[in-house]
Amino acid sequence: MQHRFRSSCILVATVIVFGTLVFIAVLERYKLDGATLLAPEGGQVPEFDGHDDELPPRIHKHRVARDMLPIDPKIIRRFQALSGRKQDDPELISFIREEFIEDRRPFLPKLSHNVYKTPQADEVDKYFKAKNDGFFVEAGALDGERSSNTIWFEKRFGWTGFLVEMDPSYYLQLRGKNRRCYTCNACISPSNYSSVVPFQEKGRGNGAIVPKASLSTFPCLCFPFYSMMRALDKVKIDYFSLDVEGQELAILRTIPFDEIDISVLSVEYLHTDKQQLRDFMESQGYVTAKTLSYENRRIPQWSYDFIFVKEDLFRAVNRTQEQS
Ligand SMILES: *[C@@H]1O[C@H](CO)[C@@H](O)[C@H](O)[C@H]1NC(C)=O
Ligand SMILES: *[C@@H]1O[C@H](CO)[C@@H](O)[C@H](O)[C@H]1NC(C)=O
């Protein structure tokens, strides 16, 4: 009897000591700068809409993942030293190649959905007729899968390409999809020079360059399109998908179309003067082959794009279509 009582005491003591150790370990794990995380009152987690003005003063209000921005002072100094250089400046071009363009990922693709052909891809497809070794550029590429205009050409016909995405959270997802593409976490400059502009994250892939910096923007580095393409050593592009929420016309105006050969473009017209956009592209030898106006909120998929096709390609395809 007495023996059993002593065993029970030892058991209880062991449980208490062990339990205390586990409790302390858990406390340590959740300790944040001396404050312990507690369940909110009533055990309910308040909804967070991304606009919390009641943050304790020590927590910085920036909502962007700061550690993903290029903060290496050596890179920033080099970037600053190259401001004002021309688009074809060799030092600017090698800087982009060395510090900003990332190689294709040599791993199995990790996609979440069946490959989906966007209305843009469907239209662009008509001009290539199952061409096998094409090269595309997509900006902004978002997560590299949802609403991707180029994934069809990569998966179906084995094209390779270059994906540009400024939003750091999308960019991380994009890298994780293991697409067979070069990628770059920067933006295409709306001027003929590299520049720093404020970028604002928004839901549904509507993040964009905005006119003024604020607490919810972060500075992002931009490079001229032509310099980026020279860094990749690519001046022949089959398909360029341009959807960057407002800078489309400004970007197109920086492109020396006599130095770089782009066969087909899809350009979102929603945030730009439509007539100016068409006039500009037509003055550069393109035909406005199609105006897409499609919306499916369920997927979600928006396609408000012009399809611009180089005159000679357009004529060749039109001719064969009439003959058949
Ligand atoms: C920018 O470069 C393009 C292509 O070289 C050129 O046509 C255009 O005039 C330039 N823009 C300005 C403002 O210099
Ligand atoms: C295709 O070519 C014919 C004449 O060759 C022309 O009448 C027609 O407008 C062209 N199609 C488009 C969409 O421009």
Image (tube, rainbow, N blue to C red):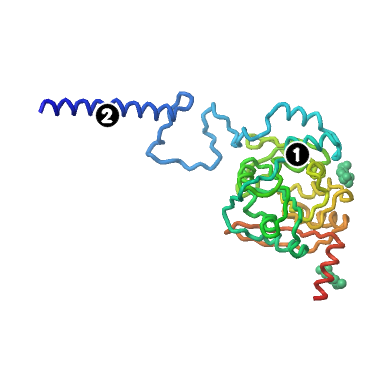
Residue type at the position of mark 2: Val
Residue type at the position of mark 1: Cys
x%, y% of residue 216?
63, 37
x%, y% of residue 274?
78, 56
Q: Secondary structure at mark 1?
A: strand
x%, y% of residue 218?
67, 35
Residue lying at the far left in this picture: please name it: 1
In which quadrant will I find the C terminus?
bottom right
x%, y% of residue 265?
78, 56
Residue plotted at (59% across, 36% down)? 63
Q: Quadrant of ligand 2?
A: bottom right
Residue 186 placement: quadrant? top right
Q: Are marks 1 and 2 in contact (CB under 8 Å)?
A: no
Query: Dot 2 surroundings within 10 Å: few (below 14), some, or many (20 or more)?
Result: few
Q: Is residue 245 left or right of residue 62?
A: right
Residue assigned mark 1: 222
Residue plotted at (62% across, 32% down)? 67
Front residue of 29/66: it is 29
Query: Dot 1 surroundings within 10 Å: few (below 14), some, or many (20 or more)?
Result: many
Residue assigned mark 2: 15
Q: Earlier in the sequence, mark 1 or mark 2?
A: 2
Cα–Cα span, label 1 and label 2: 60 Å
Residue lying at the far bottom in this picture: please name it: 324
Residue plotted at (81% across, 32% down)? 83
Question: Can residue 28 be seen here?
Answer: yes
Label 2 lies in ligand 1 vicinity (Cβ under 8 Å):
no
Question: Can residue 225 be seen here?
Answer: no
Residue 38 placement: quadrant? top left
